[in-house]
């Protein structure tokens, strides 16, 4: 979509870059400019300057600079068009779209309005769940038992969905509103994702999340788009996610990415784990650069999103068979994005540990060392290609060649791909 340059200039003249940056960075007046800690690299003394007269930001430490659109793109990882639309919405402007039919433009505007409304509904529910946590001793005891502090619970907006079928009717006066169903908060009797129960049998709608620790899922702009709920006692499923909605798609979102952005830049890599609790517990233990997939295998869209925030990605898995299978899917998702300037590694923990338990047992230094020793993508690709092959036989080497072909072909052209071809040729004897 082409946006006229004249509109970009008008937009930048309307928005205040100090206000835009101030939502993400704590700024203090220093002479004619505002100063703060740079969000793009780790520092202890402020070198990040925002000029209200020039409407420009500049870091004297890392050299990053630009206008309000550039800041949003760099800090949140969104694209140019999305950044312009975000700022335009805040400024009360309508983005002109060249070469777009009026009907399509109207549909897009209606979709944005619907998404904004659903975000508001989900945010209201998140605030209600957060308030309930303060009066839920069982939930608080569970979180304390997992070693979580009140501060980390606040950072991630953790909450509690009380027992009972219709808690949300006390939050939303119109419990029959279709928005509650569209946002995934409420289940109707004919919803296939529902469950049996008195209310279901009586043909009534009811809350999807009940008696669960609630993990709000936020997009890269910080908007609530869904929830993950963990059961407190015994029960299935242990984790329950929001369904697919107009604002939430599991294959495109990562839990904790909004909260991890600054830590990712400071650590120099992003750590991908398998669960909500891994992310929150690791943040508590000093690894705030962790994110998690949302109850689904890693997708190419996940990897593309990760590389918007860092050129180094480490996938962390349990060392058991299930962990190996998950790692193989992550490998396939990462291959199209594995350029010569990016790093992808695979961390396999002992079967008895997840990241949380490993750090608590062996300490942060041991975990950091394990991350450093993680298996590079090139080695894991060779292992995957040779899996189940008897390389002492012609048949086994032929099978390796067959298994390697789709993996190698998925790599983008470059030095890494050429080097791996030689390694594969040596492995199969060709």
Image: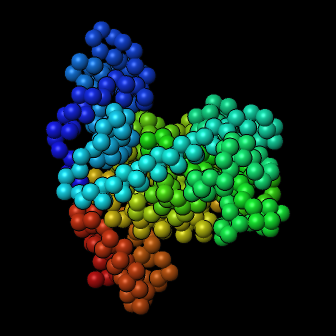
Q: Nearer the viewer, residue 5 or 304?
A: 5
Q: Is residue 376 visible?
A: no
Residue 77, placed above or below residue 352: above
Q: Position of residue 394 (x, y in %)?
A: 39, 90
Q: How many marks?
A: 0
Q: Position of residue 142 (x, y in %)?
A: 77, 43
Residue occupying image coordinates x 68% and y 63%: 188
**Side of 271 where 2 appears, left or right:** left
Q: Nearer the viewer, residue 149 or 188?
A: 188
Residue occupying image coordinates x 32% and y 82%: 429
Residue occupying image coordinates x 63% and y 30%: 151
Residue 64, placed above or below residue 390: above
Residue found farthest to the right: 198
The quarter holding residue 170 reads top right
Q: Position of residue 3 (x, y in %)?
A: 21, 47
Residue occupying image coordinates x 81% and y 42%: 138
Q: Position of residue 244 (x, y in %)?
A: 54, 61
């Amino acid at each position: 979509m082409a946006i006229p340059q004249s509109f970009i200039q008008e937009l930048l003249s309307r928005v205040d870059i100090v206000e835009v940056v101030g939502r993400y960075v704590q700024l203090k007046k220093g002479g004619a400019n505002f100063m703060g800690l740079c969000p793009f690299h780790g520092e202890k003394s402020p070198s990040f300057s925002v000029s209200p007269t020039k409407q420009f930001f500049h870091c004297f430490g890392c050299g990053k600079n630009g206008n309000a659109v550039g800041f949003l793109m760099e800090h949140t990882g969104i694209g140019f068009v999305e950044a312009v639309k975000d700022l335009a919405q805040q400024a009360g402007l309508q983005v002109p779209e060249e070469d777009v039919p009026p009907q399509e433009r109207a549909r897009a505007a209606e979709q944005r309005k619907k998404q904004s409304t659903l975000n508001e509904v989900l945010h209201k529910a998140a605030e209600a769940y957060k308030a309930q946590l303060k009066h839920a001793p069982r939930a608080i005891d569970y979180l304390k038992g997992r070693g979580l502090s009140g501060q980390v619970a606040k950072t991630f907006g953790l909450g509690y969905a009380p027992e009972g079928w219709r808690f949300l009717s006390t939050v939303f006066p119109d419990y029959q509103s279709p928005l509650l169903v569209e946002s995934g908060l409420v289940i109707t009797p004919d919803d296939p994702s529902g469950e049996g129960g008195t209310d279901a049998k009586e043909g009534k709608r009811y809350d999807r999340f009940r008696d669960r620790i609630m993990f709000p899922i936020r997009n890269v702009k910080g908007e609530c788009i869904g929830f993950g709920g963990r059961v407190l006692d015994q029960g299935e499923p242990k984790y329950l996610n929001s369904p697919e909605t107009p604002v939430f798609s599991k294959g495109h979102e990562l839990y904790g990415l909004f909260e991890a952005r600054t830590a990712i830049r400071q650590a120099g890599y992003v750590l991908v784990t398998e669960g909500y609790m891994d992310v929150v517990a690791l943040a508590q233990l000093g690894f705030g650069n962790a994110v998690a997939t949302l109850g689904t295998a890693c997708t190419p869209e996940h990897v593309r999103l990760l590389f918007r925030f860092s050129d180094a990605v480490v996938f962390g898995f349990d060392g058991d068979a299930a962990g190996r299978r998950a790692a193989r899917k992550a490998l396939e998702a990462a291959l199209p994005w594995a350029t010569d300037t990016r790093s992808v590694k695979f961390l396999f923990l002992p079967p008895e540990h997840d990241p949380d338990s490993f750090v608590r047992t062996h300490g942060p230094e041991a975990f950091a060392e394990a991350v450093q020793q993680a298996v590079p993508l090139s080695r894991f690709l060779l292992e995957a290609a040779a899996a189940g092959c008897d390389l002492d036989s012609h048949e086994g080497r032929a099978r390796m060649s067959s298994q390697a072909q789709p993996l190698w072909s998925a790599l983008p052209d470059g030095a890494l791909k050429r080097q791996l071809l030689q390694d594969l040729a040596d492995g199969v004897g060709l």
